[in-house]
Amino acid sequence: MNKKLLLFLALSGTLCTAMAQKSAKPAIPRDEKIEQQVEALLGKMSLDEKVGQMCELSIDVISKRVNPFGNINPAEFTVKDLRKILQKYKLEKEYDLSKGMPSQDVIMQLYMRIQDIEGKKGFQIDEAKLDSAITKYKVGSILNVPGGVAQSTAKWQEIIKRIQDKSMKEIGIPCIYGVDQIHGTTYTAGGTFFPQGINMGAAFNRQLTREGSRISAYETKAGSIPWTYAPVVDLGRDPRWARQWENYGEDAYLNAEMGRESVLGFQGENPNQIGSNHVAACLKHYMGYGVPVSGKDRTPSSITVQDMREKHFAPFLEAVKAGALSVMVNSAMNNGLPFHANYELLTKWLKEDLNWDGMIVTDWADINNLYSRDHIAANKKEAIKLAINAGIDMSMDPYDWHFCTLLKELVQEGEVPMSRIDDAVRRVLRLKYRLGLFDKPYYDLKDYPLFGSKEHAAAALQAAEESLVLLKNTNNLLPLSKGKKILLTGPNANSMRTLNGGWSYTWQGSNAEALSDSYNTILEAFTNKFGQENVVYEPGVTYNDKGNWWEENQPEIEKAVAAAVGVDYIVACIGENSYCETPGNLTNLFLTENQQNLVKALAKTGKPVVLILNEGRPRLIADIEPLSGAVVNIMLPGNYGGDALANLVAGDANFSGKLPYTYPKEINSLVTYDYKPSEHIGKQMEGAYNYDAVVNVQWAFGYGLSYTTFAYSNFRVDKSQFTADDVLTFTVDVKNTGSKMGKESVLLFSSDLVASLTPDNRRLRAFEKVELQPGETKTVTLKVKASDLAFVGYDGKWVLEKGDFRVQAGNQLVNITCSETKKWVTPNR
């Protein structure tokens, strides 16, 4: 082939790509008024102001830290100086200076005593540091929680009003403040907690997810916070991963559906006008975060182009189309390239291919990782160059405002184009205009009378009830009979920390007992429900809350066994203590030996055992599951989880949750439901030579029992032959064949029977939740775009191939046929 022809083809390909980008419908409709405001302001801004808007600092940077010895020369420090300090803090009677200067240990004790006194005054802004951040460096965003613990709405109002007043006065641009309110109003004291994301996935109820995010937005705005780092739409496909519980489960479609609903709940229907009751959403973590090869947080993944496009990108694609205003980037790397330096994924896939004008923010100090950890840059300056040129718009630095100085130097040296800076700043300003921050940078608490209300609590309780999964119920052991005696045991029986998990009042969910004191642990909820005279509490195993999250105290199993003598039922609340992010890494997925021994010892009493699994990820329980009569997986149901469990166990509510992930049985058989056929699940092949990879699971994705039963029948489709442009409408009759009202999540799966790439065993394509009275039948309609049955081929292109598909709902099957092949030239269908 001659060079001219090669050049022609190359130019043609570039032209086609450019045309495809321009022809893509804007992910968020363009608002001309906002665009004019952005351009007018951008044209007036200096380079210092522009790079400042691209920097996000932690609230710690501007906090006042009192050093009582700060103005004293250590070499000249005298008893007289110390006496003045004691008088200032009214501590003269606590420290004896009659013998002269005390020891260094005593001085340190005094220092800590004063820090405790200052801490009780609450968070205070250091005005000099605030001046440096805003006036000197023009910083555009602040994040995080003062002192690492949830603040009152009044305190949030005070903090953000001061920051906004300073920012508007000095640079005329409001600050955008962000927090991790990922499962309700988790960093505002008195706010409403919803179950963690994994529970919301288990509920299979879109409306509950939207409502939870709407309530969270309302209560977050009550503190004048306009931006939340949620929803989490990573795919939790490896139970070893410490962040399994933050997302909606292992499936791409489930995360896409719930992610979209969450965005609409947070932001409302119009992303260009985020009203006073809504906040900006931030999708995280873009992307492929949930499948690290090692299973450890923030470690490398090895994802194919096919899986990245078809599965990991899918929730972000759906949520961006729903108007998500910002995206946070995965801290790790894929196939050797850190996501924070990946131009193809940040700029091409997200911004250009989707015609998306939102903002991309880094995760915590992740530009630094490009040189300090990943070694693709020699220093911080080079790392900033790589990240900004790749498509990062705002750097969560979070402790170093010299990001601004270094980025300015890079622009002046021609290493970062001014066009890239202007694009990033447009995105930052556009977000602030969409939020209305220029007109109203903070809000008034009196305008939010439903903050922490009974109405919001009722919604959170319903979400918890619908998210708990009944996995086993031999001989209808549950619901428990009223008037019988119950032994509550296990380390999770009397703990709010374990019900909530991480990102709950504090980062790790620890040291927050006072803030959750008004809610019920499992023990308190059971005592309220069954009567104090009918509940015996003896934990047998407890967590060491002064140690690491996984540490347990010396077990007292014999006490629990003794307490079981006079009871009718044993309810063992086992699982995990709370953890968050990298500190949650573990090396052993089995439930702890102490907890297993507790269950084994209690089972020997002959009393019926109910296992309550309170855990952020599935811990292996194959050895003790057979010892139980019933198993309930409550995961992390939040502040109302104890009440929800008591209602369900008593039979005052009915179970309707289904597993949003595959619950593994063996440590070397970790698998997702959409496995390849060679990952055979079932009976081993007969004979000496077994080449099947047998995978044994404890419970399957989508599994969940009820106190009633459901029968499926009359499964139909409106088109048995279809093409890529069709919408397939499936209907199935679902009948409540039991004696109690129940809710059933109807899941529809498809299987591509023959394809040019080995197809997944099956894929979730639709779901609807339906409520049925005893004996009632409803026809459930499930619509599937035929194009959703396409897959990403070996060449990275979407294709729907001619051939047969099997579709399943419940125990019902129907076969359909694609009559012609379609291949997409665009990156997305």
Image: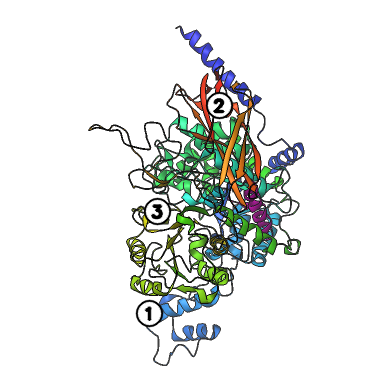
Secondary structure beneath dot 1 equals helix
Find residue 827 and name its label: 2
The earlier-in-sequence mark between 2 and 3 is 3
The earlier-in-sequence mark between 3 and 1 is 1
The earlier-in-sequence mark between 1 and 2 is 1
Residue 530 place in picture, x, y as percent? 55, 70
Task: Tell me how far mark 2 sits from mark 3, CA to CA.
Answer: 38 Å
| The image quarter in which residue 134 lies | bottom right
Find residue 619 and name its label: 3
Residue plotted at (52% across, 18% down): 802
Find residue 105 and name its label: 1
Task: Look at the numbered discs 2 and 3 and tell me whether their residues touch, using CB distance below 8 Å.
Answer: no
Mark 1 or 2: in front is: 2
- 819, 512: nearer the viewer: 819
Q: Amino acid at mark 2?
A: Pro
| The image quarter in which residue 574 lies | bottom left
- Span shown in magenta: 204-230
Task: Tell me how far mark 1 sits from mark 2, CA to CA.
Answer: 65 Å
Q: Amino acid at mark 3?
A: Arg
